[in-house]
Image (cartoon, helix red, strand yellow):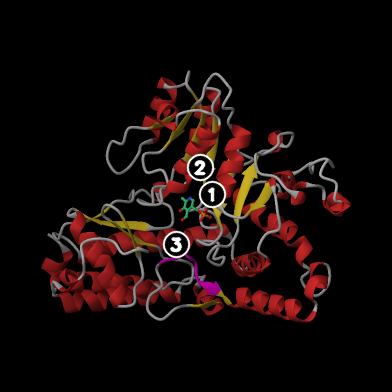
Amino acid sequence: MSAEKSFPISTLKSHLHAEAEFFDAVDPLSFMREEYFLPEGIYLDGNSLGAMSRQEEFRLDEYKEARRKLGVRAWTEGSNPWFWLNNTLRQKMAPLIGAKPGEISIMPTVSNAITQAVSVLYDPDGERKGVLVDSNVFPTDGRAIAAYMRDHKLNPNDHIHTVPAQGEITEEKDIVATMEQLKDQVSLVVWPTVDYKTGQLYDTALITREAHDRGIKVLFDASHSFAMVPHHANDEDADGYVWTDYKWANGSPGTVGGMYLNSRYQIEEGVLSGWWAAEEDDQFDMDWLSPLANDARRFESGTLSVPALVSLLGALETLETTTVAMRREKSLKQTGHLIKLVDTLLPERGFYIATPRDPRRRGGHIALAHENPAVAAPINEALKRYGVPPDFRPPRFIRLAPACYNTFQELVDTILIARDVYDSGEYLQFPGTRRIVA
Ligand SMILES: Cc1ncc(COP(=O)(O)O)c(C=O)c1O
């Protein structure tokens, strides 16, 4: 029997609020809430654009001051000289990916980073020209690989392979079976650490091991796990990782992306290059024939947006008041709690959790799905009306992404709002299709 049949809803609500109050009271990360500017309402979109921290604002103010007062001298003078920002960020990102700072490149976007990483890890002239991707492949990843192939006179339709989808979740054993089946054709796997729609977390160690056993390289897109789920790139002998910094790392929109390539690739040249690829000391020799840097700088290209870099610096400094392990622990409690709330408050209405229930297979967000795809988009819009911005991903996923700054009380309120807008039929006022930014 469902909880709502055994208790009147008012009793259930007060029980859930009291329980959440307790969880918030004992939450070791509750202090993080004060570190951020949270938009009015319940901010549950940290996997799309993380909230702005006070330290990010401080770094941006510092930047404005330097830009105003020092002009070009701010590259090397002032309290936070811009020229060394890439290096500082490399240091800060390395532990989050489980690598050495010299293996981290700061890239303008993930879209750029994928092109660069593919150009190093994939040989279009090799015997095995195939690339294996997931069936939900993020558009940037798919397009970048296809464009690279086309540029090498290859037809992507012939060489991009997917693992046949057996439902919303892709089992690792099916990825391995496809690698085995295509091992004579495929030389690179490009895979997400966390599926951006369903929130499924993949076993990166297993995928890497199985791929390497077949002579296949792996590039992970960690956009939906970076700074939220601990990564162990060096321990797993990974080939490459790329990630965005404006999601769980809380950088500003359009902030830079990151790339890790195992140090064994530091003899290679990427397809994107520029004057920032030189050794730091050589850069101002202005000699385009000077050697590339001996570390991950060699994969960087031009001048990055300094406001984006300082934003990210502030965002990472705020996160450093915790550890990724602590954030992961809180996140798993939050997503586990959301699952319980959906089971308790939304039974028999066609809603279900598309994210794996096993915490070891869950990233940082929960995909609340509805059996009828035409219901999910309007529920998402109705939630926004009540100040809860989740986001909608076709065909039927409402992504709920609690971050270190969210309370358990907010999670209860969110699912109560979803229940109210569904039961009252209010959601029917909204179109059954997504908005331009969903
Ligand atoms: C999984 C994934 N990969 C890549 C990107 C694109 O990143 P960028 O805009 O930095 O190119 C996104 C953006 O949301 C993403 O979710």
Relative image position of residue 318 (x, y in whole percent): 61, 70
Q: Is residue 137 above or below residue 390?
A: above
User: Which residue is at 36% across, 48% downward?
Assistant: 358
Figure disc tally: 3
Which element type, helix, strand or loop, lies under badge 3?
A: loop
Residue 33 makes an appearance in the image: yes
How packed mark 3 is, by other alpha carbons closer than 10 Å (few <14, some 14-19, many 20 or more), is many
User: Which residue is at 43% across, 57% downward?
Assistant: 364
Q: Is residue 279 left or right of residue 111?
A: right
How packed mark 2 is, by other alpha carbons closer than 10 Å (few <14, some 14-19, many 20 or more), is some
Q: Which residue is mark 2?
A: 144
Relative image position of residue 330 (x, y in whole percent): 46, 63
Q: Which is more N-terminal, label 1 or label 3?
A: 3
Q: Which residue is mark 1?
A: 111
Which element type, helix, strand or loop, lies under badge 2?
A: helix
Q: Which residue is mark 3?
A: 48
Q: Is mark 1 within 8 Å of ligand 1?
A: yes
Residue 255 location, quadrant: bottom right
Res 86 label: none
Residue type at mark 1: give it.
Ser
Q: Is mark 3 within 8 Å of ligand 1?
A: yes
Segment colored magenta: 45-52
**Contact check, label 1 and label 2, Cβ < 8 Å:** yes
Q: Quadrant of the N terminus?
A: bottom left
What is the distance, in whole Å, between disc 3 and disc 1 at their CAs? 16 Å
What is the distance, in whole Å, between disc 1 and disc 2 at their CAs? 7 Å
Residue type at mark 2: give it.
Ala
